[in-house]
Image (cartoon, grey):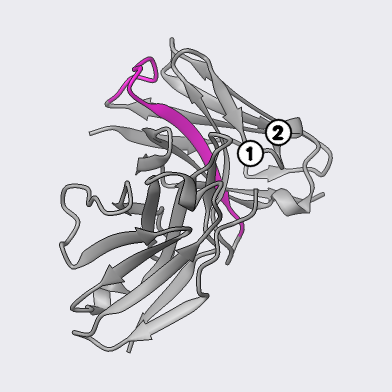
């Protein structure tokens, strides 16, 4: 199984919105609505911020939203804040009943 | 709130077996509602799913690692473990244990760094 494709980096200014894409195949992202997103700050464990494409766990800001179209899922962060800086990883269930992660995207808030 | 804590040697020699344990508190690995997984992350790189185990004992592994990996559970100690044999420098990484449903993980351990070196 190949890693899902994410942009290596994105940036935005405080208050702006950014979108991170996550592209897979018809055997993973496109096969189910089982894409999740994780936020990771330096030296910390990943934190789940989105599951089942567009569902936020309790306590996650509604500035985070998710969507999916075909083999590509997207995470949008609106009203960027400096605390949003970090790495973001998408993940998908696969037709082989495994889990595959994206390569990660580093978000810089300028 | 469930907590997970990884433990094990921080240094493993090439060709030897990496063994890690995840101790779970605040939740039971016997729960049929969850899957218990191992995920790793080489320094400066992305996450890689290693595999998972369910309370039924059912396991699933990353195809690229399957031949070298075994995940097992010990309900008496509320722990689950990872064994990876024939390690090389490419297995040097932060190793995380995590709890979740079959396809996402809401609870993670803090991670344990394993270095493969002679």
**Is residue B61 visible from the viewing direction of this image?**
yes
Which residue is painted at 59% across and 62% down in the image? B43
Which residue is painted at 53% across and 42% down in the image? A94
Q: Is residue A84 above or below residue A56?
A: below
Q: Which portion, as a residue range, is magenta?
A: B27-42
Label of residue B66 in the image = 2
Q: Disc 2 vs disc 1: Cβ atoms closer than 8 Å?
A: yes
Could you say whether the residue bearing mark 1 is in a helix, strand or loop?
Answer: loop
Side of A59 where A53 appears, left or right: right
Assess disc 2: are there few (<14), some (14-19) or many (≥20) residues with their C-alpha within 10 Å of its C-alpha: few
- In the rendering, at what x and y percent does residue B54 appear? 46, 21
**Quarter of image, res B47:** bottom right
Q: Which residue is mark 1?
A: B62
Q: Is residue B49 above or below residue B101?
A: below
Q: Is residue B72 above or below residue B99?
A: above
**Is residue B108 visible from the viewing direction of this image?**
no
Q: Chain of mark 1?
A: B
Q: Is residue B69 magenta?
A: no
- In the rendering, at what x and y percent does residue B17 appear? 75, 33
- In the rendering, at what x and y percent does residue B111 appear? 48, 46
Q: Nearer the viewer, residue B38 or B89?
A: B38
Which residue is painted at 55% across and 65% down in the image? A5
**Quarter of image, res B24:** top left
Q: Is residue B30 magenta?
A: yes
């Amino acid at each position: 199984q190949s890693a899902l494709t994410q942009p290596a980096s994105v940036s935005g200014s405080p208050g702006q919105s950014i979108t991170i894409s996550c592209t897979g195949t018809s055997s993973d992202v496109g096969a189910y609505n089982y894409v999740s997103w994780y936020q990771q700050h330096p030296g910390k464990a990943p934190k789940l911020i989105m599951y089942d494409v567009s569902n936020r766990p309790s306590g996650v800001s509604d500035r985070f939203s998710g969507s999916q179209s075909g083999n590509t899922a997207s995470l949008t962060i609106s009203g960027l804040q400096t605390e949003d800086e970090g790495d973001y990883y998408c993940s998908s269930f696969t037709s082989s009943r495994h889990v595959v992660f994206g390569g990660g995207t580093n978000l810089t808030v300028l | 709130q469930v907590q997970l804590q990884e433990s094990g040697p921080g240094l493993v020699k090439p060709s030897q077996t990496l063994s890690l344990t995840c101790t779970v508190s605040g939740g039971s690995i016997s729960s049929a509602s969850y899957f218990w997984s191992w995920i790793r992350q080489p320094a400066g790189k992305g996450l890689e799913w290693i595999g998972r185990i369910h309370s039924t004992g059912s396991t699933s592994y990353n195809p690229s690692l399957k031949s070298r990996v075994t995940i097992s559970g010990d309900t008496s100690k509320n722990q689950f473990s990872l064994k990876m044999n024939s390690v090389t420098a490419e297995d040097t990484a932060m190793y995380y244990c995590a709890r979740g449903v079959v396809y996402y993980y809401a609870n993670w351990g803090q991670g344990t760094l394993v270095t493969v070196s002679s």
